[in-house]
Image: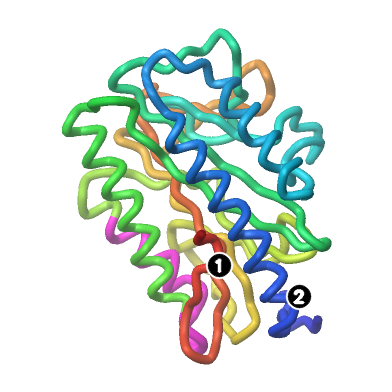
């Protein structure tokens, strides 16, 4: 593994290990999505994630990371990221719930996130989820060798803001590999006065739009982890781990 401007370049064998790590994450997210329903306590999703990590023989990537106590980030409605699973928090019809999941497989990390509708949701909630998911696809399409990293950021930001939504600025995507968070940071907006790195084959990025129905400003709750929208309006979060290759972007976090 070599570095370019501090960014790790993975070889084909390393990317193959990351593909498996991310495949496992995708399978876990599939199972979590199937379990989403009104009346389910959010701790149930933590139990599913823990059970599946044991079945696959992998380590939950988030548990213990910086002191985070769970395998799963489970964020409901106005919770943007890093929400705690809870036996007291019961999903209700019309909620949206985001799952952010990571594992360690053969010393390499996988990381992906999805937001799900709970039962029948409002048109506004459905539109937010659709826009966030599509903004991720728009960003991934720009992860081409020779492009600037901020081409990814611009694609997300322009798509989201053209639809009247905002992108969170406090949290960003990231490089990923033998560490959960590597260089470069992958913002969902174009930072002013900064030049992003040129994308090269072998770079692996966790691209993760966090999109809000209202303000992009967030607050951290008393648990010191859960980030919520300052205006308490809905938020959605989608993430894929993507390898930059000579043939273009390859999404690793698929089943």
Q: Are marks 2 and 1 in contact (CB under 8 Å)?
A: no
Up/down of 112 relative to 216, above or below: below
Q: Is residue 27 visible from the viewing direction of this image?
A: yes
Q: Position of residue 159 (x, y in %)?
A: 27, 59
Tell whether position 5 is magenta: no
In this rendering, the answer to whether 88 lies above or below 1 is above
**Residue 24 position within the rendered picture, expressed as x and y whole percent measured from the top left:** 62, 54
Mark 1 packing: few (<14 Cα in 10 Å), some, or many (20+)?
Answer: many
Which residue shows up at 71% across the image and 81% down it?
9
Whole-Å distance between the Cαs marked 2 and 1?
22 Å
Give the prevailing secondary structure in the magenta stretch. Answer: helix
Question: Looking at the image, is 141 positioned above or below residue 218?
Answer: below
* Residues drawn in magenta: 144-159
Q: Which residue is mark 2?
A: 6
Identify the residue at image location x=26%, y=33%. Answer: 125
- Label 2's element? loop
Q: Earlier in the sequence, mark 2 or mark 1?
A: 2
Residue drawn at (51%, 74%) of the image: 149
Q: Position of residue 179 (x, y in %)?
A: 78, 59
Answer whether residue 5 is visible to the viewer in this image: no
In the displayed structure image, the side of residue 240 where residue 140 appears, left or right = left
- Residue 193 against residue 197 in the figure, above or below: above
Quadrant for the N terminus, please. bottom right
Question: Which of the pair 68/233 is nearer the observer?
Answer: 68
Residue that mark 1 sits on:
252
Q: Which sits in the foreground, 81 or 87?
A: 87
């Amino acid at each position: 593994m070599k570095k370019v401007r501090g960014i790790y370049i993975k070889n084909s064998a390393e990317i193959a290990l990351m593909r498996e790590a991310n495949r496992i994450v995708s399978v876990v997210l599939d199972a979590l999505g199937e379990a989403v329903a009104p009346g389910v306590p959010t701790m149930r999703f933590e139990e599913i994630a823990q059970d599946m990590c044991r079945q696959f023989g992998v380590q939950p990537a988030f548990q213990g990371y910086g002191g985070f106590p769970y395998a799963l980030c489970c964020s409901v409605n106005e919770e943007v990221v890093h929400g705690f699973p809870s036996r007291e928090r019961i999903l209700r019809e019309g909620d949206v719930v985001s799952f952010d999941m990571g594992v360690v497989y053969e010393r390499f990390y996988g990381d992906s996130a999805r937001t799900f509708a709970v039962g029948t949701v409002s048109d506004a909630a459905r539109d937010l989820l659709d826009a966030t998911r599509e903004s991720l696809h728009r960003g991934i399409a720009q992860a081409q060798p020779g492009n600037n990293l901020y081409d990814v950021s611009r694609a997300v930001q322009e798509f989201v803001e053209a639809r009247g939504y905002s992108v969170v600025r406090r949290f960003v995507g990231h490089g990923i590999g033998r560490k959960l968070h590597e260089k470069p940071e992958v913002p969902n907006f174009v930072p002013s006065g900064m030049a992003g790195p040129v994308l090269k084959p072998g770079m692996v990025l966790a691209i993760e739009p966090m999109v809000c129905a209202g303000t992009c400003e967030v607050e951290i709750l008393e648990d010191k982890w859960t980030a919520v929208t300052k205006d308490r309006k809905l938020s959605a979060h989608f993430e894929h781990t993507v390898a930059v290759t000579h043939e273009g972007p390859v999404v690793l976090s698929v089943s």
